[in-house]
Image (cartoon, grey):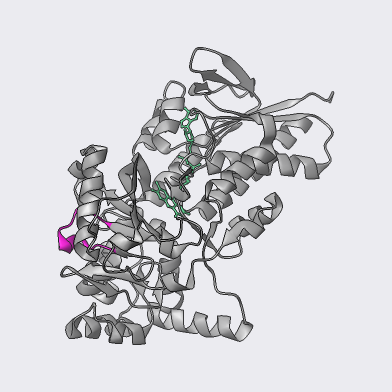
Amino acid sequence: MASRSRSIMVIGGGVSGLSTAYYINRLWAASGVRDKLDVTVLERSGSAGGKIATERHDGFVIELGPDSVFADGGAFTGLCAELGISGKTIAPAQRSSRACLLLGGALKELPRGLTSMLPTALMPILTSDILSPVGKLRASMELFVPRGRGGDESAAAFVRRRFGNEVYERIAEPLMCGIHAGDPARTSMRSTFPSISAMEARRRSLILDAASRGAAKQAHGSRPAGFVALDAGMSGLTDALARALGGSVRTNSAVESVSIGNVAENRHTVVLRGGTTMRADAVVIAVPAYDSAALVEQSDPELARMLNSIEYRSVAIATLAYKSADVRERPVGSGFLVPRIEGSRLSAVTWSSMKWAGRAPPDTLLARCFFNDAYGGETLYLDDDSLVQLAHGELAKLFGIGAAPVLSRVQRWRRGMPQYTMGHAELVGAIADRLHEHSGLFMTGAWIDGVGIPRCLSNATKTANEVFDYISNEMVS
Ligand SMILES: Cc1cc2nc3c(=O)[nH]c(=O)nc-3n(C[C@H](O)[C@H](O)[C@H](O)COP(=O)(O)OP(=O)(O)OC[C@H]3O[C@@H](n4cnc5c(N)ncnc54)[C@H](O)[C@@H]3O)c2cc1C
Protein backbone atom coordinates (compact mmCIF):
# COMPACT_ATOMS: atom_id res chain seq x y z
CA MET A 1 0.00 0.00 0.00
CA ALA A 2 1.29 3.45 -0.92
CA SER A 3 2.13 5.50 2.13
CA ARG A 4 -0.10 8.42 2.94
CA SER A 5 -0.42 10.68 5.91
CA ARG A 6 -3.06 9.96 8.51
CA SER A 7 -5.06 12.46 10.48
CA ILE A 8 -6.66 12.13 13.88
CA MET A 9 -8.87 14.79 15.43
CA VAL A 10 -9.16 14.86 19.20
CA ILE A 11 -12.09 17.01 20.33
CA GLY A 12 -11.60 18.56 23.77
CA GLY A 13 -8.40 19.96 25.26
CA GLY A 14 -8.90 18.88 28.88
CA VAL A 15 -6.57 16.38 30.46
CA SER A 16 -8.40 13.48 28.73
CA GLY A 17 -8.03 14.91 25.21
CA LEU A 18 -4.48 16.20 25.66
CA SER A 19 -3.20 12.97 27.16
CA THR A 20 -4.95 10.82 24.52
CA ALA A 21 -3.23 12.86 21.79
CA TYR A 22 0.08 12.61 23.63
CA TYR A 23 -0.19 8.82 24.05
CA ILE A 24 -1.17 8.32 20.37
CA ASN A 25 1.91 10.28 19.25
CA ARG A 26 4.08 8.26 21.60
CA LEU A 27 2.75 4.93 20.28
CA TRP A 28 3.22 6.09 16.70
CA ALA A 29 6.79 7.22 17.33
CA ALA A 30 7.63 3.92 19.04
CA SER A 31 6.10 1.83 16.23
CA GLY A 32 8.74 2.95 13.74
CA VAL A 33 6.09 3.50 11.03
CA ARG A 34 7.44 6.15 8.69
CA ASP A 35 4.10 7.50 7.44
CA LYS A 36 3.17 10.89 8.75
CA LEU A 37 0.56 11.08 11.48
CA ASP A 38 -1.17 14.37 12.29
CA VAL A 39 -2.91 14.46 15.64
CA THR A 40 -4.84 17.70 16.20
CA VAL A 41 -6.55 18.69 19.45
CA LEU A 42 -9.54 21.00 18.97
CA GLU A 43 -10.44 23.00 22.07
CA ARG A 44 -13.48 25.27 22.31
CA SER A 45 -12.14 27.75 24.85
CA GLY A 46 -9.17 30.10 24.64
CA SER A 47 -6.83 27.80 26.54
CA ALA A 48 -6.19 24.10 27.04
CA GLY A 49 -6.66 22.32 30.38
CA GLY A 50 -10.44 22.02 30.78
CA LYS A 51 -11.29 21.74 34.48
CA ILE A 52 -7.62 21.85 35.40
CA ALA A 53 -7.07 25.58 35.73
CA THR A 54 -4.73 27.54 38.01
CA GLU A 55 -4.71 31.30 38.48
CA ARG A 56 -2.06 33.37 40.23
CA HIS A 57 -2.84 36.69 41.96
CA ASP A 58 -0.51 38.67 44.25
CA GLY A 59 1.43 35.59 45.36
CA PHE A 60 -1.69 33.39 45.78
CA VAL A 61 -2.03 30.20 43.75
CA ILE A 62 -5.74 29.63 43.15
CA GLU A 63 -6.98 26.32 41.83
CA LEU A 64 -10.29 26.70 40.00
CA GLY A 65 -10.70 22.93 39.63
CA PRO A 66 -8.66 20.04 41.03
CA ASP A 67 -5.99 20.86 43.61
CA SER A 68 -4.30 17.46 43.86
CA VAL A 69 -4.03 13.97 42.46
CA PHE A 70 -4.10 10.62 44.18
CA ALA A 71 -0.73 9.24 43.10
CA ASP A 72 -0.29 5.52 43.55
CA GLY A 73 2.68 5.07 41.26
CA GLY A 74 0.39 4.59 38.24
CA ALA A 75 -0.54 6.68 35.20
CA PHE A 76 -0.04 10.13 36.78
CA THR A 77 3.39 9.29 38.18
CA GLY A 78 4.50 7.80 34.85
CA LEU A 79 3.26 10.76 32.82
CA CYS A 80 4.98 13.30 35.09
CA ALA A 81 8.25 11.41 34.63
CA GLU A 82 7.87 11.42 30.83
CA LEU A 83 6.99 15.11 30.75
CA GLY A 84 9.94 15.97 33.00
CA ILE A 85 7.77 17.44 35.78
CA SER A 86 8.25 14.77 38.49
CA GLY A 87 10.49 17.22 40.36
CA LYS A 88 7.58 19.66 40.55
CA THR A 89 5.30 17.34 42.52
CA ILE A 90 4.83 18.22 46.17
CA ALA A 91 3.37 16.27 49.09
CA PRO A 92 0.88 17.82 51.52
CA ALA A 93 2.45 19.70 54.43
CA GLN A 94 2.83 17.59 57.56
CA ARG A 95 0.72 20.04 59.58
CA SER A 96 -2.24 19.33 57.34
CA SER A 97 -2.56 15.63 58.08
CA ARG A 98 -5.71 16.26 60.17
CA ALA A 99 -9.04 16.64 58.45
CA CYS A 100 -12.11 17.72 60.39
CA LEU A 101 -15.86 17.52 60.32
CA LEU A 102 -18.32 20.16 61.46
CA LEU A 103 -20.68 18.50 63.91
CA GLY A 104 -23.13 20.33 66.16
CA GLY A 105 -21.42 23.58 65.15
CA ALA A 106 -17.98 22.43 66.37
CA LEU A 107 -15.01 21.05 64.45
CA LYS A 108 -14.06 17.48 65.29
CA GLU A 109 -11.24 15.39 63.87
CA LEU A 110 -12.18 12.74 61.32
CA PRO A 111 -11.01 9.29 62.41
CA ARG A 112 -7.69 8.27 60.89
CA GLY A 113 -7.45 5.18 58.70
CA LEU A 114 -10.13 6.19 56.19
CA THR A 115 -10.27 4.21 52.96
CA SER A 116 -11.79 6.62 50.46
CA MET A 117 -14.95 7.58 52.37
CA LEU A 118 -15.06 4.87 55.03
CA PRO A 119 -13.41 4.28 58.40
CA THR A 120 -11.68 0.94 57.94
CA ALA A 121 -9.39 0.90 61.00
CA LEU A 122 -10.99 -0.33 64.22
CA MET A 123 -9.11 1.69 66.87
CA PRO A 124 -9.74 5.10 65.27
CA ILE A 125 -13.44 4.19 65.05
CA LEU A 126 -13.54 3.29 68.75
CA THR A 127 -11.67 6.41 69.89
CA SER A 128 -13.40 8.90 67.56
CA ASP A 129 -15.56 11.58 69.17
CA ILE A 130 -17.63 11.82 66.01
CA LEU A 131 -19.63 8.67 66.72
CA SER A 132 -21.87 7.93 69.70
CA PRO A 133 -21.20 4.74 71.74
CA VAL A 134 -24.05 3.03 69.87
CA GLY A 135 -22.67 4.26 66.54
CA LYS A 136 -19.21 2.90 67.42
CA LEU A 137 -20.66 -0.47 68.40
CA ARG A 138 -22.61 -0.68 65.15
CA ALA A 139 -19.56 0.36 63.10
CA SER A 140 -17.42 -2.35 64.81
CA MET A 141 -20.05 -4.93 63.89
CA GLU A 142 -18.86 -4.44 60.29
CA LEU A 143 -16.42 -7.22 61.09
CA PHE A 144 -19.32 -9.67 61.11
CA VAL A 145 -21.63 -8.29 58.41
CA PRO A 146 -22.04 -10.79 55.54
CA ARG A 147 -21.37 -9.90 51.90
CA GLY A 148 -24.13 -8.18 49.96
CA ARG A 149 -26.38 -10.07 47.56
CA GLY A 150 -24.40 -8.98 44.49
CA GLY A 151 -25.64 -6.69 41.74
CA ASP A 152 -25.61 -2.91 41.88
CA GLU A 153 -26.37 -1.18 45.18
CA SER A 154 -26.53 2.50 46.09
CA ALA A 155 -23.59 3.93 48.03
CA ALA A 156 -25.97 4.94 50.85
CA ALA A 157 -27.40 1.41 51.14
CA PHE A 158 -23.91 -0.14 51.08
CA VAL A 159 -22.54 2.05 53.89
CA ARG A 160 -25.66 1.70 56.05
CA ARG A 161 -25.64 -2.09 55.57
CA ARG A 162 -21.99 -2.47 56.52
CA PHE A 163 -21.36 0.34 59.08
CA GLY A 164 -24.74 1.65 60.18
CA ASN A 165 -26.46 5.01 59.85
CA GLU A 166 -24.12 7.12 62.00
CA VAL A 167 -21.06 6.33 59.90
CA TYR A 168 -23.18 7.06 56.86
CA GLU A 169 -24.55 10.44 58.00
CA ARG A 170 -21.48 11.71 59.82
CA ILE A 171 -18.57 10.40 57.73
CA ALA A 172 -19.45 8.75 54.42
CA GLU A 173 -22.16 11.11 53.21
CA PRO A 174 -20.13 14.31 53.80
CA LEU A 175 -17.16 12.79 52.00
CA MET A 176 -19.30 11.56 49.12
CA CYS A 177 -21.35 14.75 48.79
CA GLY A 178 -18.42 17.05 49.45
CA ILE A 179 -16.12 15.37 46.95
CA HIS A 180 -18.38 13.80 44.30
CA ALA A 181 -21.21 16.31 44.73
CA GLY A 182 -23.57 13.39 44.36
CA ASP A 183 -26.64 11.97 46.06
CA PRO A 184 -25.40 8.74 47.70
CA ALA A 185 -28.93 7.29 47.62
CA ARG A 186 -28.72 7.31 43.79
CA THR A 187 -24.99 6.74 43.37
CA SER A 188 -23.89 3.32 42.16
CA MET A 189 -21.47 1.83 44.68
CA ARG A 190 -19.92 -0.49 42.10
CA SER A 191 -19.23 2.25 39.54
CA THR A 192 -18.27 5.10 41.89
CA PHE A 193 -16.23 3.23 44.49
CA PRO A 194 -15.03 0.07 42.72
CA SER A 195 -12.04 -0.39 45.02
CA ILE A 196 -14.31 -0.46 48.10
CA SER A 197 -16.71 -2.90 46.46
CA ALA A 198 -13.66 -5.05 45.68
CA MET A 199 -12.69 -5.06 49.38
CA GLU A 200 -16.02 -6.63 50.27
CA ALA A 201 -15.75 -9.13 47.44
CA ARG A 202 -12.22 -10.06 48.55
CA ARG A 203 -12.46 -10.43 52.33
CA ARG A 204 -16.13 -9.73 53.18
CA SER A 205 -15.20 -7.27 55.96
CA LEU A 206 -13.63 -3.97 54.84
CA ILE A 207 -11.93 -3.59 58.23
CA LEU A 208 -10.32 -7.05 57.87
CA ASP A 209 -9.31 -6.37 54.28
CA ALA A 210 -7.71 -3.00 55.13
CA ALA A 211 -5.81 -4.60 58.04
CA SER A 212 -4.47 -7.48 55.94
CA ARG A 213 -3.44 -5.21 53.07
CA GLY A 214 -1.81 -2.75 55.46
CA ALA A 215 0.21 -5.58 56.97
CA ALA A 216 1.17 -6.88 53.50
CA LYS A 217 2.34 -3.40 52.41
CA GLN A 218 4.42 -3.04 55.56
CA ALA A 219 6.01 -6.44 54.96
CA HIS A 220 6.96 -5.42 51.40
CA GLY A 221 8.11 -1.98 52.56
CA SER A 222 6.02 -0.33 49.82
CA ARG A 223 5.68 3.44 49.78
CA PRO A 224 2.19 4.52 50.80
CA ALA A 225 0.08 6.05 48.04
CA GLY A 226 -1.15 9.55 48.71
CA PHE A 227 -2.26 12.88 47.31
CA VAL A 228 0.27 15.09 45.56
CA ALA A 229 0.05 18.47 43.85
CA LEU A 230 2.31 20.41 41.49
CA ASP A 231 4.35 23.22 43.01
CA ALA A 232 3.03 26.00 40.77
CA GLY A 233 -0.47 24.54 40.51
CA MET A 234 -2.21 21.68 38.74
CA SER A 235 -2.23 23.41 35.37
CA GLY A 236 1.48 22.49 35.31
CA LEU A 237 0.30 19.08 34.08
CA THR A 238 -1.89 20.24 31.21
CA ASP A 239 0.57 23.02 30.28
CA ALA A 240 3.34 20.39 29.99
CA LEU A 241 1.08 18.17 27.87
CA ALA A 242 0.17 21.10 25.60
CA ARG A 243 3.87 22.00 25.27
CA ALA A 244 4.70 18.40 24.30
CA LEU A 245 1.98 18.53 21.64
CA GLY A 246 3.27 21.83 20.27
CA GLY A 247 1.24 23.55 17.57
CA SER A 248 -1.18 20.66 17.24
CA VAL A 249 -3.42 22.07 20.01
CA ARG A 250 -5.87 24.50 18.43
CA THR A 251 -7.74 26.65 20.94
CA ASN A 252 -10.86 28.72 20.11
CA SER A 253 -11.90 25.79 17.92
CA ALA A 254 -15.40 24.76 18.96
CA VAL A 255 -16.64 21.66 17.19
CA GLU A 256 -20.28 21.77 16.26
CA SER A 257 -20.82 18.24 15.00
CA VAL A 258 -19.10 15.08 13.88
CA SER A 259 -20.60 13.45 10.85
CA ILE A 260 -19.80 9.82 10.99
CA GLY A 261 -18.62 8.42 7.65
CA ASN A 262 -20.00 5.17 6.30
CA VAL A 263 -17.99 1.99 6.80
CA ALA A 264 -16.66 1.88 3.24
CA GLU A 265 -15.53 5.46 3.43
CA ASN A 266 -13.93 5.05 6.86
CA ARG A 267 -13.46 8.78 7.26
CA HIS A 268 -15.32 11.23 9.45
CA THR A 269 -16.01 14.91 9.05
CA VAL A 270 -15.60 17.36 11.90
CA VAL A 271 -17.61 20.56 11.52
CA LEU A 272 -16.30 23.58 13.40
CA ARG A 273 -18.40 26.52 14.58
CA GLY A 274 -18.40 28.88 11.63
CA GLY A 275 -18.76 26.03 9.17
CA THR A 276 -15.16 24.96 8.51
CA THR A 277 -15.02 21.20 7.88
CA MET A 278 -12.09 18.90 8.48
CA ARG A 279 -11.78 15.27 7.43
CA ALA A 280 -10.10 12.71 9.67
CA ASP A 281 -9.22 9.02 9.61
CA ALA A 282 -10.19 8.77 13.26
CA VAL A 283 -11.97 11.06 15.69
CA VAL A 284 -11.64 10.95 19.48
CA ILE A 285 -14.35 12.79 21.41
CA ALA A 286 -12.93 13.76 24.83
CA VAL A 287 -15.58 16.12 26.20
CA PRO A 288 -18.32 15.71 28.87
CA ALA A 289 -21.08 13.21 27.97
CA TYR A 290 -23.71 15.90 27.23
CA ASP A 291 -21.27 17.74 24.91
CA SER A 292 -20.44 14.41 23.23
CA ALA A 293 -24.18 13.86 22.72
CA ALA A 294 -24.53 17.22 20.95
CA LEU A 295 -21.68 16.31 18.60
CA VAL A 296 -23.21 13.01 17.41
CA GLU A 297 -26.89 14.00 17.67
CA GLN A 298 -27.40 14.23 13.92
CA SER A 299 -25.41 11.12 12.98
CA ASP A 300 -26.67 8.80 15.69
CA PRO A 301 -29.59 10.06 17.81
CA GLU A 302 -29.71 6.84 19.85
CA LEU A 303 -26.05 7.21 20.87
CA ALA A 304 -26.79 10.84 21.76
CA ARG A 305 -29.78 9.78 23.86
CA MET A 306 -27.66 7.33 25.85
CA LEU A 307 -24.93 9.93 26.42
CA ASN A 308 -27.49 12.50 27.51
CA SER A 309 -28.83 10.14 30.16
CA ILE A 310 -25.58 10.44 32.14
CA GLU A 311 -26.30 12.84 34.98
CA TYR A 312 -24.13 15.74 36.08
CA ARG A 313 -24.07 17.86 39.22
CA SER A 314 -22.94 21.47 39.46
CA VAL A 315 -20.36 22.85 41.87
CA ALA A 316 -18.99 26.26 42.79
CA ILE A 317 -15.82 27.14 44.65
CA ALA A 318 -15.39 30.43 46.49
CA THR A 319 -11.71 31.01 47.22
CA LEU A 320 -11.08 33.50 50.02
CA ALA A 321 -7.80 34.86 51.39
CA TYR A 322 -7.29 36.45 54.80
CA LYS A 323 -4.48 38.13 56.68
CA SER A 324 -3.45 35.68 59.43
CA ALA A 325 -3.66 38.50 61.98
CA ASP A 326 -7.40 38.81 61.25
CA VAL A 327 -8.06 35.14 62.08
CA ARG A 328 -8.41 34.68 65.84
CA GLU A 329 -8.74 30.86 65.95
CA ARG A 330 -5.97 29.44 63.81
CA PRO A 331 -7.33 26.59 61.69
CA VAL A 332 -5.88 23.15 62.32
CA GLY A 333 -5.38 20.59 59.54
CA SER A 334 -6.24 20.62 55.87
CA GLY A 335 -9.88 21.67 56.15
CA PHE A 336 -13.28 20.35 57.09
CA LEU A 337 -16.38 18.69 55.71
CA VAL A 338 -19.91 19.70 56.55
CA PRO A 339 -22.46 16.86 56.85
CA ARG A 340 -25.86 17.65 55.34
CA ILE A 341 -27.44 17.12 58.78
CA GLU A 342 -25.73 20.39 59.86
CA GLY A 343 -28.11 22.27 57.55
CA SER A 344 -25.32 24.49 56.16
CA ARG A 345 -25.15 25.47 52.50
CA LEU A 346 -21.38 24.95 52.50
CA SER A 347 -20.26 21.38 51.76
CA ALA A 348 -16.52 21.53 52.47
CA VAL A 349 -13.57 23.87 53.04
CA THR A 350 -9.92 23.25 52.19
CA TRP A 351 -7.26 25.44 53.78
CA SER A 352 -4.99 25.45 50.70
CA SER A 353 -2.28 27.46 52.45
CA MET A 354 -2.14 24.89 55.28
CA LYS A 355 -2.26 21.89 52.96
CA TRP A 356 0.35 22.85 50.38
CA ALA A 357 3.51 24.93 50.53
CA GLY A 358 3.70 28.01 48.33
CA ARG A 359 -0.04 28.59 47.87
CA ALA A 360 -0.16 31.93 49.69
CA PRO A 361 2.25 34.68 50.79
CA PRO A 362 3.54 34.52 54.40
CA ASP A 363 1.10 35.70 57.06
CA THR A 364 -1.97 34.97 54.96
CA LEU A 365 -4.45 32.09 54.81
CA LEU A 366 -6.16 30.78 51.69
CA ALA A 367 -9.47 28.85 51.89
CA ARG A 368 -11.37 27.00 49.16
CA CYS A 369 -15.06 26.85 50.08
CA PHE A 370 -17.21 24.35 48.18
CA PHE A 371 -20.88 24.59 47.29
CA ASN A 372 -22.77 21.96 45.34
CA ASP A 373 -26.33 21.17 44.41
CA ALA A 374 -26.53 18.23 46.83
CA TYR A 375 -26.73 20.95 49.55
CA GLY A 376 -29.46 22.98 47.89
CA GLY A 377 -29.22 23.82 44.20
CA GLU A 378 -30.56 27.36 44.69
CA THR A 379 -27.29 28.37 46.43
CA LEU A 380 -25.46 27.98 43.13
CA TYR A 381 -27.69 30.64 41.57
CA LEU A 382 -26.52 33.29 44.05
CA ASP A 383 -24.30 35.94 42.51
CA ASP A 384 -20.57 35.90 43.22
CA ASP A 385 -20.71 38.51 46.00
CA SER A 386 -23.44 36.59 47.83
CA LEU A 387 -21.50 33.31 47.58
CA VAL A 388 -18.40 35.04 48.96
CA GLN A 389 -20.48 36.56 51.79
CA LEU A 390 -21.99 33.16 52.58
CA ALA A 391 -18.57 31.47 52.73
CA HIS A 392 -17.06 34.36 54.70
CA GLY A 393 -19.94 34.29 57.19
CA GLU A 394 -19.39 30.58 57.95
CA LEU A 395 -15.62 30.98 58.28
CA ALA A 396 -15.92 34.15 60.38
CA LYS A 397 -18.23 32.33 62.82
CA LEU A 398 -15.97 29.30 63.18
CA PHE A 399 -12.57 30.99 63.25
CA GLY A 400 -13.32 34.40 64.73
CA ILE A 401 -12.39 36.34 61.60
CA GLY A 402 -12.72 40.04 62.22
CA ALA A 403 -12.04 41.48 58.76
CA ALA A 404 -13.18 40.98 55.19
CA PRO A 405 -11.14 38.72 52.91
CA VAL A 406 -8.23 40.43 51.15
CA LEU A 407 -9.00 38.46 47.98
CA SER A 408 -11.93 36.44 46.67
CA ARG A 409 -12.58 34.48 43.50
CA VAL A 410 -15.64 32.43 42.57
CA GLN A 411 -15.50 29.63 40.03
CA ARG A 412 -18.61 27.76 38.90
CA TRP A 413 -18.64 24.44 37.13
CA ARG A 414 -22.13 24.03 35.73
CA ARG A 415 -22.74 20.31 35.23
CA GLY A 416 -19.12 19.87 36.25
CA MET A 417 -19.29 16.51 38.03
CA PRO A 418 -20.49 13.35 36.24
CA GLN A 419 -22.59 11.06 38.43
CA TYR A 420 -22.44 7.32 38.21
CA THR A 421 -26.00 6.47 39.14
CA MET A 422 -27.40 2.97 39.49
CA GLY A 423 -26.90 0.95 36.31
CA HIS A 424 -24.04 3.21 35.12
CA ALA A 425 -21.77 0.28 34.17
CA GLU A 426 -24.48 -1.20 31.93
CA LEU A 427 -25.11 2.21 30.31
CA VAL A 428 -21.41 2.73 29.59
CA GLY A 429 -21.26 -0.82 28.17
CA ALA A 430 -24.20 -0.06 25.85
CA ILE A 431 -22.51 3.18 24.70
CA ALA A 432 -19.29 1.25 23.98
CA ASP A 433 -21.25 -1.34 21.94
CA ARG A 434 -22.91 1.43 19.96
CA LEU A 435 -19.56 3.13 19.34
CA HIS A 436 -18.15 -0.10 17.90
CA GLU A 437 -20.66 0.29 15.08
CA HIS A 438 -18.85 3.47 14.02
CA SER A 439 -15.34 2.42 13.11
CA GLY A 440 -12.83 5.19 13.65
CA LEU A 441 -14.94 7.00 16.27
CA PHE A 442 -13.75 6.87 19.89
CA MET A 443 -14.79 8.49 23.16
CA THR A 444 -12.95 9.02 26.42
CA GLY A 445 -13.34 11.19 29.50
CA ALA A 446 -14.36 11.49 33.12
CA TRP A 447 -17.92 10.27 32.54
CA ILE A 448 -16.81 6.69 31.82
CA ASP A 449 -15.55 5.16 35.04
CA GLY A 450 -13.64 7.64 37.17
CA VAL A 451 -13.57 11.41 37.63
CA GLY A 452 -10.09 11.53 39.18
CA ILE A 453 -7.21 12.63 36.96
CA PRO A 454 -5.38 9.25 37.22
CA ARG A 455 -8.49 7.45 35.93
CA CYS A 456 -8.83 9.97 33.07
CA LEU A 457 -5.19 9.17 32.18
CA SER A 458 -5.77 5.40 32.30
CA ASN A 459 -8.78 5.77 30.02
CA ALA A 460 -6.73 7.99 27.70
CA THR A 461 -4.04 5.29 27.51
CA LYS A 462 -6.65 2.67 26.64
CA THR A 463 -8.27 4.91 24.02
CA ALA A 464 -4.88 5.77 22.48
CA ASN A 465 -4.10 2.05 22.13
CA GLU A 466 -7.44 1.44 20.43
CA VAL A 467 -6.89 4.36 18.04
CA PHE A 468 -3.37 3.19 17.27
CA ASP A 469 -4.58 -0.38 16.55
CA TYR A 470 -7.37 0.98 14.37
CA ILE A 471 -5.09 3.24 12.34
CA SER A 472 -2.43 0.52 11.98
CA ASN A 473 -4.98 -2.09 10.83
CA GLU A 474 -6.58 0.36 8.46
CA MET A 475 -3.17 0.90 6.84
CA VAL A 476 -2.69 -2.75 5.99
CA SER A 477 -6.29 -3.44 4.94
C1 LIG B 1 -14.33 21.49 41.29
C2 LIG B 1 -13.63 20.22 40.86
C3 LIG B 1 -12.62 19.71 41.67
C4 LIG B 1 -11.95 18.54 41.28
N1 LIG B 1 -10.95 18.07 42.08
C5 LIG B 1 -10.23 17.01 41.65
C6 LIG B 1 -9.05 16.62 42.36
O1 LIG B 1 -8.65 17.28 43.36
N2 LIG B 1 -8.33 15.56 41.90
C7 LIG B 1 -8.72 14.87 40.78
O2 LIG B 1 -8.03 13.91 40.40
N3 LIG B 1 -9.81 15.24 40.06
C8 LIG B 1 -10.56 16.29 40.47
N4 LIG B 1 -11.64 16.70 39.73
C9 LIG B 1 -12.02 15.93 38.52
C10 LIG B 1 -11.13 16.28 37.32
O3 LIG B 1 -10.74 17.63 37.37
C11 LIG B 1 -11.89 16.05 36.02
O4 LIG B 1 -12.54 14.79 36.04
C12 LIG B 1 -10.96 16.08 34.81
O5 LIG B 1 -10.18 17.27 34.84
C13 LIG B 1 -11.81 15.97 33.56
O6 LIG B 1 -10.99 16.11 32.43
P1 LIG B 1 -11.58 15.89 30.95
O7 LIG B 1 -10.51 16.22 30.01
O8 LIG B 1 -12.21 14.54 30.86
O9 LIG B 1 -12.78 16.93 30.84
P2 LIG B 1 -12.75 18.51 30.88
O10 LIG B 1 -11.70 18.99 31.80
O11 LIG B 1 -14.16 18.92 31.10
O12 LIG B 1 -12.29 18.92 29.42
C14 LIG B 1 -13.15 18.88 28.32
C15 LIG B 1 -12.72 19.98 27.35
O13 LIG B 1 -13.49 19.85 26.17
C16 LIG B 1 -13.81 21.15 25.72
N5 LIG B 1 -15.00 21.03 24.86
C17 LIG B 1 -16.27 20.71 25.21
N6 LIG B 1 -17.06 20.69 24.13
C18 LIG B 1 -16.28 21.00 23.08
C19 LIG B 1 -16.53 21.15 21.69
N7 LIG B 1 -17.76 20.98 21.18
N8 LIG B 1 -15.51 21.48 20.87
C20 LIG B 1 -14.25 21.63 21.38
N9 LIG B 1 -13.96 21.53 22.68
C21 LIG B 1 -14.96 21.20 23.52
C22 LIG B 1 -14.03 21.96 26.98
O14 LIG B 1 -13.88 23.34 26.73
C23 LIG B 1 -12.96 21.38 27.89
O15 LIG B 1 -11.75 22.11 27.82
C24 LIG B 1 -12.33 17.86 40.08
C25 LIG B 1 -13.35 18.39 39.28
C26 LIG B 1 -14.00 19.56 39.65
C27 LIG B 1 -15.07 20.12 38.77
Residue found 26% across the figure and 74% down from its top: 108
Q: Residue furthest top?
A: 275
Q: Give whichever of 1, 169 is nearer the camera.
A: 169
Q: Name the main secondary structure of what is drawn in magenta.
A: loop
Query: Disc count in the image?
Result: 0
241 lies left or right of 315: right
Q: Give whichever of 33, 100 is nearer the camera.
A: 100
State which quadrant residue 180 falls in.
bottom left
Residue found 47% across the figure and 22% down from its top: 299
Q: Position of residue 332 (x, y in %)?
A: 34, 71
Q: Is residue 172 above or below residue 240?
A: below
185 lies left or right of 299: left
User: Does 84 appear in magenta?
Assistant: no
User: Does 339 appear in magenta?
Assistant: yes
Residue found 55% across the figure and 74% down from its top: 224
437 lies left or right of 167: right
The quadrant in which the N terminus is found is: top right
Q: Position of residue 376 (x, y in %)?
A: 19, 48
294 lies left or right of 313: right
**Magenta extent:** 337-347
Q: Position of residue 372 (x, y in %)?
A: 27, 49
